[in-house]
Amino acid sequence: MRITVLLLFFALHALWMSATAQSSSGSLQITVTGIRNNNGKILCSLFKEGEGYPDQTTLAFYKTSAVIKDRKALISVDGLPIGYYAVALLHDENGDNKMNTSLVGLPKEGYGFSNNVMGLFGPPPFSKASFRLISGEHKTIQINLRY
Protein backbone atom coordinates (compact mmCIF):
# COMPACT_ATOMS: atom_id res chain seq x y z
CA MET A 1 0.00 0.00 0.00
CA ARG A 2 2.79 2.36 0.93
CA ILE A 3 4.53 1.77 -2.45
CA THR A 4 1.28 2.43 -4.31
CA VAL A 5 0.82 5.75 -2.48
CA LEU A 6 4.42 6.76 -3.24
CA LEU A 7 4.07 5.83 -6.91
CA LEU A 8 0.82 7.77 -7.14
CA PHE A 9 2.46 10.78 -5.46
CA PHE A 10 5.40 10.77 -7.88
CA ALA A 11 3.13 10.29 -10.90
CA LEU A 12 0.95 13.25 -9.87
CA HIS A 13 4.03 15.35 -9.11
CA ALA A 14 5.50 14.58 -12.56
CA LEU A 15 2.19 15.43 -14.21
CA TRP A 16 1.98 18.72 -12.30
CA MET A 17 5.58 19.63 -13.20
CA SER A 18 4.90 18.89 -16.86
CA ALA A 19 1.78 21.07 -16.89
CA THR A 20 3.63 23.88 -15.11
CA ALA A 21 6.52 23.76 -17.59
CA GLN A 22 4.18 23.84 -20.56
CA SER A 23 2.14 26.75 -19.24
CA SER A 24 5.16 28.95 -18.50
CA SER A 25 5.61 29.63 -22.20
CA GLY A 26 3.57 30.92 -25.10
CA SER A 27 3.68 31.35 -28.84
CA LEU A 28 3.68 34.27 -31.24
CA GLN A 29 2.39 34.56 -34.78
CA ILE A 30 3.32 37.65 -36.78
CA THR A 31 1.52 38.59 -39.98
CA VAL A 32 3.54 41.07 -42.05
CA THR A 33 1.55 43.30 -44.41
CA GLY A 34 2.20 46.41 -46.45
CA ILE A 35 5.09 44.78 -48.33
CA ARG A 36 5.61 46.62 -51.61
CA ASN A 37 6.87 43.63 -53.64
CA ASN A 38 7.84 39.95 -53.38
CA ASN A 39 11.58 40.60 -53.73
CA GLY A 40 13.98 39.43 -51.04
CA LYS A 41 12.82 38.32 -47.61
CA ILE A 42 11.59 39.63 -44.28
CA LEU A 43 14.18 39.72 -41.49
CA CYS A 44 12.68 39.44 -38.01
CA SER A 45 14.37 40.19 -34.69
CA LEU A 46 12.48 39.45 -31.48
CA PHE A 47 13.83 41.25 -28.43
CA LYS A 48 13.03 40.19 -24.86
CA GLU A 49 12.90 42.73 -22.04
CA GLY A 50 14.57 45.36 -24.25
CA GLU A 51 18.01 43.77 -24.44
CA GLY A 52 19.69 44.93 -27.67
CA TYR A 53 16.53 46.56 -29.01
CA PRO A 54 16.39 47.51 -31.86
CA ASP A 55 19.82 47.81 -33.47
CA GLN A 56 21.89 45.12 -31.75
CA THR A 57 20.42 42.11 -33.51
CA THR A 58 23.18 39.88 -32.14
CA LEU A 59 21.48 40.35 -28.74
CA ALA A 60 18.01 39.54 -30.06
CA PHE A 61 16.27 36.74 -28.18
CA TYR A 62 15.21 35.16 -31.48
CA LYS A 63 16.01 35.90 -35.13
CA THR A 64 14.54 34.45 -38.29
CA SER A 65 13.65 35.30 -41.86
CA ALA A 66 10.45 34.73 -43.78
CA VAL A 67 9.57 34.20 -47.42
CA ILE A 68 7.30 36.79 -49.02
CA LYS A 69 4.28 35.51 -50.91
CA ASP A 70 1.62 37.74 -52.44
CA ARG A 71 3.20 40.70 -50.64
CA LYS A 72 2.64 39.11 -47.22
CA ALA A 73 4.76 37.07 -44.82
CA LEU A 74 3.99 34.90 -41.81
CA ILE A 75 6.34 34.24 -38.90
CA SER A 76 5.58 31.77 -36.08
CA VAL A 77 7.59 31.33 -32.89
CA ASP A 78 6.70 28.63 -30.35
CA GLY A 79 7.97 27.98 -26.83
CA LEU A 80 8.63 31.60 -25.86
CA PRO A 81 9.13 32.20 -22.13
CA ILE A 82 6.64 34.62 -20.63
CA GLY A 83 7.76 38.24 -20.56
CA TYR A 84 7.84 41.48 -22.52
CA TYR A 85 8.90 41.43 -26.17
CA ALA A 86 9.26 43.78 -29.13
CA VAL A 87 9.59 42.88 -32.80
CA ALA A 88 11.68 44.72 -35.39
CA LEU A 89 11.19 43.81 -39.06
CA LEU A 90 13.12 44.65 -42.22
CA HIS A 91 12.14 43.98 -45.83
CA ASP A 92 15.56 42.98 -47.13
CA GLU A 93 14.75 43.48 -50.81
CA ASN A 94 18.28 42.90 -52.12
CA GLY A 95 19.28 40.04 -49.79
CA ASP A 96 22.29 41.74 -48.20
CA ASN A 97 20.99 41.15 -44.63
CA LYS A 98 21.14 44.81 -43.64
CA MET A 99 19.06 47.95 -43.92
CA ASN A 100 20.10 50.05 -46.88
CA THR A 101 19.89 53.80 -46.43
CA SER A 102 20.13 56.92 -48.55
CA LEU A 103 23.03 59.37 -48.34
CA VAL A 104 21.21 61.23 -45.57
CA GLY A 105 20.50 58.03 -43.62
CA LEU A 106 16.85 57.48 -44.53
CA PRO A 107 15.81 53.83 -44.99
CA LYS A 108 15.51 52.60 -48.59
CA GLU A 109 13.88 49.32 -47.54
CA GLY A 110 10.68 48.68 -45.61
CA TYR A 111 10.68 48.34 -41.84
CA GLY A 112 8.21 47.96 -39.01
CA PHE A 113 7.84 47.43 -35.28
CA SER A 114 5.37 45.64 -33.07
CA ASN A 115 2.31 47.69 -32.11
CA ASN A 116 2.88 49.45 -35.48
CA VAL A 117 4.56 52.32 -33.64
CA MET A 118 7.05 54.66 -35.24
CA GLY A 119 9.73 56.77 -33.63
CA LEU A 120 9.95 60.49 -34.22
CA PHE A 121 13.60 60.59 -35.29
CA GLY A 122 14.61 56.94 -35.31
CA PRO A 123 13.14 53.73 -33.96
CA PRO A 124 10.45 53.83 -31.27
CA PRO A 125 11.46 53.07 -27.68
CA PHE A 126 11.03 49.54 -26.36
CA SER A 127 8.27 50.75 -24.03
CA LYS A 128 6.12 51.75 -27.03
CA ALA A 129 6.86 48.70 -29.21
CA SER A 130 6.68 46.05 -26.50
CA PHE A 131 3.88 43.68 -25.64
CA ARG A 132 3.41 41.15 -22.87
CA LEU A 133 3.29 37.42 -23.54
CA ILE A 134 1.54 35.58 -20.73
CA SER A 135 1.58 31.93 -19.74
CA GLY A 136 -0.08 29.64 -22.28
CA GLU A 137 -0.93 32.52 -24.63
CA HIS A 138 -0.99 32.16 -28.41
CA LYS A 139 -0.54 35.81 -29.38
CA THR A 140 -1.20 37.00 -32.92
CA ILE A 141 0.03 40.40 -34.09
CA GLN A 142 0.09 42.21 -37.42
CA ILE A 143 2.86 44.57 -38.46
CA ASN A 144 2.45 46.89 -41.43
CA LEU A 145 5.73 47.82 -43.08
CA ARG A 146 6.61 51.41 -43.94
CA TYR A 147 8.84 52.61 -46.73
Image: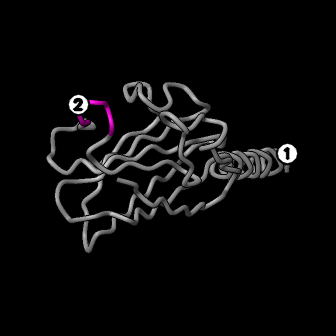
Mark 1 Cα-neighbour bin, 10 Å: few <14, some 14–19, many ≥20 = few
Compared to residue 144, the image places residue 97 above or below, namely above
User: Which segment did they paint magenta?
Assistant: 101-106
| Left or right: 34 as drawn, with respect to 2 | left
Please state the horizontal and vertical placement of residue 4, each as a whole percent of the image: 79, 51
Task: Please tell me which residue lies in front, 142 or 146.
Answer: 146
Q: Does residue 54 belong to the magenta stretch?
A: no
Please state the horizontal and vertical placement of residue 67, each as a whole percent of the image: 24, 60
CA gap between label 1 and label 2 equals 78 Å
Compared to residue 38, the image places residue 77 above or below, namely above
Instruction: Find numbered disc 2 in the image and state the secondary structure of the residue it sits on.
Output: loop
User: Residue 2 — which label?
Assistant: 1
Please state the horizontal and vertical placement of residue 35, each as a whole percent of the image: 32, 63
Name the main secondary structure of what is drawn in magenta. Answer: loop
| Left or right: 33 as drawn, with respect to 28 | left
User: Residue 103 — which label?
Assistant: 2
Task: Please tell me which residue lies in front, 82 or 130.
Answer: 130
| Left or right: 45 as drawn, with respect to 133 | left
Nearer the camera: disc 1 or disc 2: 2
The way the protein has been coloured in the rendering is one colour
Disc 2 residue type (three-letter): Leu
